[in-house]
Image (spheres, rainbow, N blue to C red):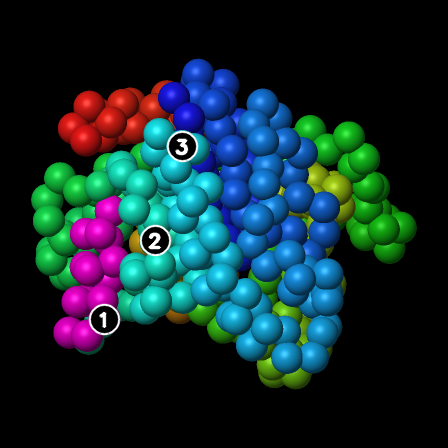
Amino acid sequence: MRVQVVDPPAFSPPYDHSLCAAISAAGAEVELVTSRYLYGPPPAQNGYRVNEAFYRRSAERGLEARGRRAYKLAEHVRDMSRYRAHAEQADLVHWQWFPVPQADRFLLAPKRPRVFTLHHYLPEEPSRRQRRAVRKRLEAMDGVVMHSEHGRQRMEEEFGVRSGLIEVIPHGALDYLTRQPDEQPLPPELAEVEGPVILAFGIIRPYKGTDVLLRAFRELAGAELWIAGKPMTDMQPLRELARAAPGKVRILERFIPDNELPALVRRADVLVLPYRTVEQSGVLYTGLAFGKAMVLSAVGGFPEVAAHGAARLVAPGEEAELASALSELVASPEERSALADAAADAAETHYSWDRIGERHLDLYRRLLEQS
């Protein structure tokens, strides 16, 4: 079976590369069709081909090029049109992202069957126009992968997507991060820290509740808080909250490459995801891969992970509840150990890429038989 996994903007390299390796290990011939990832080296390929067919000129111009977005959009139409011919080399095409969804529905290669993984966040109160647009986009597919029953239920009940189109296949634990050949040690100022550490990492955006975490941290004692990631929001209010906290807060305001991430995660005693809203998060599946004790907001598909005993849940936006959960874990190595063991077990079973690769191939075979 020849499968092309397509992520034109390279929005999710950790997932793309993990999925391609899993599908390849399950027996498919796999090609990842994407663009050059400009934020650092992508995960190493393992058993599949990579074709950086999209946005080649934009990539050469670099991240800071003037007018990059407009230039990239002009390339998009041309590259999507060019890809139509290349898609004929596959038995099945599996899309990961549509960068220009309003237009991409008309630019898709006619090759069938085609599958789409819905990664992006769904609005809490979608308008009629949003529901219609999402429904049309998904029903142009022969199959849609979602990572949680929560997402599938919302799609069918709120957006009117026909029953049976969506296949729930979990997001896998990002275990490739635990095997970085050039893993970097912690910076000296972090390596010297001796007490418990609470870690929040990933791109810093408003929906991730960093402000909620900082306010909750005012009620904690006996731990440091590390916040690491590239800012995509105004950081001044967060810096002010950090300065007002009685405990030590360290903010690493930069992109954390794969080879620096393991040392940070291994050092953390508790990983916290205080999101206001989300469907899924690569941060969560990094925590599973490293077997970390985690505190998650009860949003999106997070409760389905917590149901395996792999995390503590708190209500989104509830600072006092978040502070209480973090305080209890900081004070209890036994409870942290129990959560960590459950996270590691979930990573090796329900969220293992071996299982996920087989489930994707089962879906592909079923769609090919129906086509």
- How far apart marks 3 and 2 lie (CA) works out to 14 Å
**Along the horizontal axis of the image, is 329 left or right of 239?**
left
| Element at label 3 | loop
The amino acid marked with disc number 3 is Ala
User: Bounds of the magenta span?
Assistant: 128-141
The residue to which callout 2 is attached is 108
Q: Nearer the viewer, residue 89 or 45?
A: 89
The amino acid marked with disc number 1 is Gln
Q: How many marks?
A: 3
Q: Nearer the viewer, residue 228 or 270?
A: 228
The residue to which callout 1 is attached is 130
The amino acid marked with disc number 2 is Leu
The residue to which callout 3 is attached is 90
Q: Nearer the viewer, residue 202 or 215?
A: 202
Question: Is the stretch drawn in magenta largely helix, strand or loop?
Answer: helix
Image coordinates for residue 237, horizontal then vertical, percent: 61, 83
